[in-house]
Image: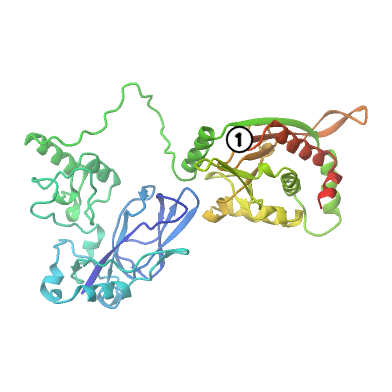
């Protein structure tokens, strides 16, 4: 007998509570192996391929591409055999039953099977792993429904419907249940239908679908609402649009964009920031870079030189490499410098982190910036690549602008912004000359230091830009 197991969206770590389905990697009816990736999701941190811990035949999928799913929501169901192999000998013709009668298989041949045997079968079909670094527990201890393995192939085209019990909990009419989502698979494909039912307290398992193979349509939910109103049942009211709302294109704040919005809002809400800025003559810094690259060996980027200046400045002004513990009312000064840098991608702004930047030279920093930037544009950065920063370097000069007042990357305490380098009139050695000038802006958390410390940091950075030889004192 085949056993149908439900695979739910696992905890992806880093405090993430939801993910958006980007692309399904399997279809209903496909045979999957243990730990085979079945869906690609986008979290607020990165793109992740989610592997299924069960091996068998996919009998149902939940959620269309573009749907946002909370952690713990069902992703798909898999029919597995007694020994963990795909149902019905591992052929793709094995399908889940379309009638969904509960206990059909167990009533005829599995009633004498113990709960421990059921757990053993489920465990053998599961790897116990979902993502590297995260895992599932052993197979659930509760007994799963056992379904017949041999049914027509067409029945796998839609999710497996389930019959509602005679008197479901929460409503005598068997349709309305307040404040809960149906726990098992139901014959619903559209997330819009699920939301309509959830917002109005409709138990989808109490409905008979009018679509193909019993598929529940929007009309079925609306008919249930009308029937309930006729019986005097008052469902939870659907949200009524505000007449004053401006109608236009609405773009959900989710994924990377949602995470950025949350972090920036928290920064503005919690951090009393201040900004100071200065113009600096970068002519000598550009000449130094040209000389370094002409000497042979790996090329050194301008961003790497600016990063090296930042780490030297933080060594002189360590208060700025810190964070604030609000609960303890303490400033935590950090020993290592994990340098974040802003990178614009098609998915939005991300801030990859270079670990132990204070211990790297210009060549090492150049290589790490290049690797992380390429991963950011390809969408392959991991959550570890995007967290744990202690200070951020923001080169907004690539957008052709001179200055900015950056928002601090919470929970850090400061950010250095670098504008474009352009030729400008400048007084050099007492005479007017055309020099390569850059504007440097520095935003800091006023709780960790006063203006004197921030000004000293920025002045030291500007001195290193104007006279790179100043760096030799810290080498």
Give the camera-side residue of 46 and 277: 277
Q: Residue at x 62, y 33 (%)?
A: 446
Q: Residue at x 32, y 53 (%)?
A: 73
Residue 172 image position (x, y, % from top left): 8, 46
Give the camera-side residue of 459 and 285: 459
| Left or right of 65, for residue 238 | left
| Left or right of 448, for residue 127 | left
Residue 232 visible, this orientation:
yes
Residue 197 image position (x, y, % from top left): 22, 43
| Left or right of 29, for residue 103 | left
Above-or-below relation of 88 to 209: below
Which coloring applies here?
Answer: rainbow
What element does badge 1 sit on?
loop
Q: Quadrant of residue 150?
A: bottom left
Residue 340 image position (x, y, % from top left): 63, 47
Q: Quadrant of residue 231?
A: top left
Above-or-below relation of 427 to 23: above
Residue linked to disc 1: 447
Q: Quadrant of the N terminus?
A: bottom left
Residue 122 image position (x, y, % from top left): 28, 71
């Amino acid at each position: 007998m085949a056993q149908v197991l439900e695979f739910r969206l696992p905890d992806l770590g880093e405090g993430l509570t939801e993910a958006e389905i980007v692309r399904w990697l399997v279809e209903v009816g496909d045979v999957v192996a243990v730990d085979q990736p079945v869906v690609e999701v986008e979290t607020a941190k990165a793109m992740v391929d989610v592997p299924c811990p069960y091996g068998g035949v996919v009998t149902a999928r939940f959620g269309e591409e573009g749907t946002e799913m909370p952690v713990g929501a069902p992703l798909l169901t898999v029919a597995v055999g007694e020994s963990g192999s795909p149902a019905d000998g591992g052929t793709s013709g094995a399908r889940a039953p379309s009638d969904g009668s509960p206990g059909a298989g167990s009533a005829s041949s599995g009633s004498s099977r113990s709960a421990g045997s059921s757990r053993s079968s489920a465990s053998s079909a599961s790897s116990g792993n979902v993502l590297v670094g995260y895992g599932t527990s052993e197979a659930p201890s509760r007994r799963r429904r056992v379904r017949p393995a041999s049914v027509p192939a067409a029945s796998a085209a839609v999710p497996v419907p389930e019959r509602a019990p005679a008197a479901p909990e929460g409503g005598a009419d068997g349709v309305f249940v307040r404040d809960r989502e149906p726990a098992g698979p139901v014959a619903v494909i559209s997330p819009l239908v699920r939301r309509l039912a959830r917002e109005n307290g409709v138990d989808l398992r109490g409905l008979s679908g009018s679509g193909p193979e019993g598929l529940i349509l929007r009309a079925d939910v609306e008919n249930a609402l009308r029937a309930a109103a006729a019986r005097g049942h008052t469902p939870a009211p659907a949200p009524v649009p505000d007449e004053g709302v401006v109608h236009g294109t609405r773009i959900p704040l989710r994924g990377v964009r949602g995470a950025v919005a949350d972090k920036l809002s928290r920064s503005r809400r919690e951090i009393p920031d201040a900004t100071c800025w200065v113009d600096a003559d970068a002519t000598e810094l550009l000449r130094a870079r040209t000389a370094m690259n002409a000497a042979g060996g790996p090329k050194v980027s301008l961003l790497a030189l600016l990063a090296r200046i930042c780490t030297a400045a933080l060594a002189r002004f360590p208060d700025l490499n810190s964070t604030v513990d609000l609960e303890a009312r303490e400033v935590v000064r950090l020993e290592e410098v994990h340098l974040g840098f802003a990178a614009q991608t098609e998915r939005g702004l991300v801030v990859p982190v270079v670990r132990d930047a204070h211990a790297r030279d210009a060549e090492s920093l150049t290589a790490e910036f290049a690797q992380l930037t390429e991963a950011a544009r390809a969408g392959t950065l991991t959550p570890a690549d995007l967290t744990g920063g202690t200070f951020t370097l923001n080169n907004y000069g690539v957008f052709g602008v001179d200055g900015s007042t950056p928002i601090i990357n919470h929970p850090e305490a400061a950010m250095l912004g670098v504008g474009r380098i352009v030729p400008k009139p400048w007084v050099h050695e007492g005479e007017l000359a055309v020099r390569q000038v850059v504007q440097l802006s520095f935003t800091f958390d006023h709780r960790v230091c006063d203006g004197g410390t921030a000004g000293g940091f920025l002045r030291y950075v500007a001195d290193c830009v104007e006279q790179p030889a100043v760096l030799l004192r810290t080498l």
